[in-house]
Amino acid sequence: MSVELSVRGLRAGYGAVEVLHGVDLAAPRGALTALLGPNGAGKTTLLSTIAGLLPVRSGSIRWQGRECAGAPADDLARHGMLLIPERRGIFSTLTVHDNLEVFAGRGADLSRAFEAFPVLEQRRTQRAGSLSGGEQQMLAMSRALLRTPPLLLLDEISIGLAPRVTRLLFDVVADLARAGTTVVLVEQYLSDALRLADVVYVLARGEIAFAGEPAELEGRALPGYVTAAR
């Protein structure tokens, strides 16, 4: 598989604190790469730095054949890099319908989102901030369905959600990867992440502790991880 996203020797952090200490990662094109590790390992920092939300101290981020380290987040987004953060990134004061139009453009066909998440069609006139946590995450995931981005970065989309909702979200992620979207997934449910992933990286204390295929991690325990969505 060819590489869609290549990270080499990446160092980044917050203020005087360095969180990532020379991280290397290669996400194959059209595949799902799982990024695992305990809380505080630097997973969110890595996604945020790739997406241009945090400055790069040193190292390289190559995507779509060009160097992206230091590129503005809005420029990366315009070229098709989509980050769905842990806190969902929806517009809480807008209705479900208005959020979807912000994601896809005014007058766009919203049927793909409604087909994947029928509850959103039932809530289309409801303010997004009044939705349940699971419904808000469905709304956030609809951005990926409506845009079909070449690169999708997902930060713990299942955190705090009911297993039924988690399974639905994972199904959508798997469908996006099968359709050709390159996905980098940070996830709390170890066995579900391994089931979905083509490639797995484990981040520990800001460094890559493991890189390989999911089968190589089966049966191992990672601190801070839940085995599966029940």
Image (spheres, helix red, strand yellow):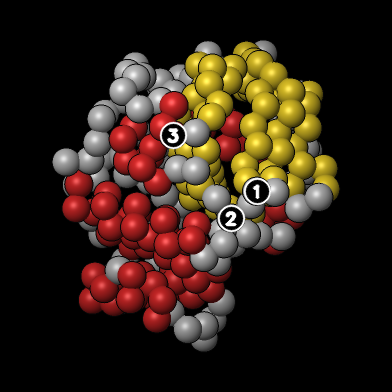
Q: Is disc 2 in contact with disc 1, using a CB cutoff of under 8 Å?
A: yes
Mark 2 or mark 3: name the one nearer the start of the chain: 2
The x and y percentages for residue 226 are 26, 28
In the displayed structure, 152 sits above or below 49; it is below
| Quarter-of-image position of residue 15 | top right
Mark 1 or mark 3: name the one nearer the start of the chain: 1
Secondary structure under badge 1? Answer: loop
Q: Is residue 109 visible?
A: yes
In the displayed structure, 33 sits above or below 46; it is below
The tag on residue 1 is 1
Name the one closer to the observer, 86 or 220. 220
Q: Quadrant of the C terminus?
A: top left
Quick one: which residue is furthest to the front in this view?
215
Mark 2 or mark 1: name the one nearer the start of the chain: 1
Binning the other alpha carbons within 10 Å of mark 2 as few (below 14), some (14 to 19) or many (20 upward) gives many
Name the one closer to the observer, 33 or 135. 33
Query: In the rendered structure, which amino acid carries the disc numbered 3?
Result: Pro
Query: In the rendered structure, which amino acid carries the disc numbered 2?
Result: Gly
Q: Is residue 154 left or right of residue 63?
A: left
Query: In the rendered structure, which amino acid carries the disc numbered 1?
Result: Met
The x and y percentages for residue 160 are 26, 40
In the displayed structure, 9 sits above or below 162; it is above
Q: CA distance from mark 2 to mark 1?
A: 8 Å
Q: Is residue 107 left or right of residue 113?
A: right
Q: CA distance from mark 1 to mark 3?
A: 16 Å
Q: Residue at x 71, y 25 (%)?
A: 10
The tag on residue 30 is 2
The residue singled out by tag 3 in the image is 214
Q: Residue at x 20, y 47 (%)?
A: 163
The x and y percentages for residue 196 are 40, 46
Q: Is disc 1 in contact with disc 3, using a CB cutoff of under 8 Å?
A: no
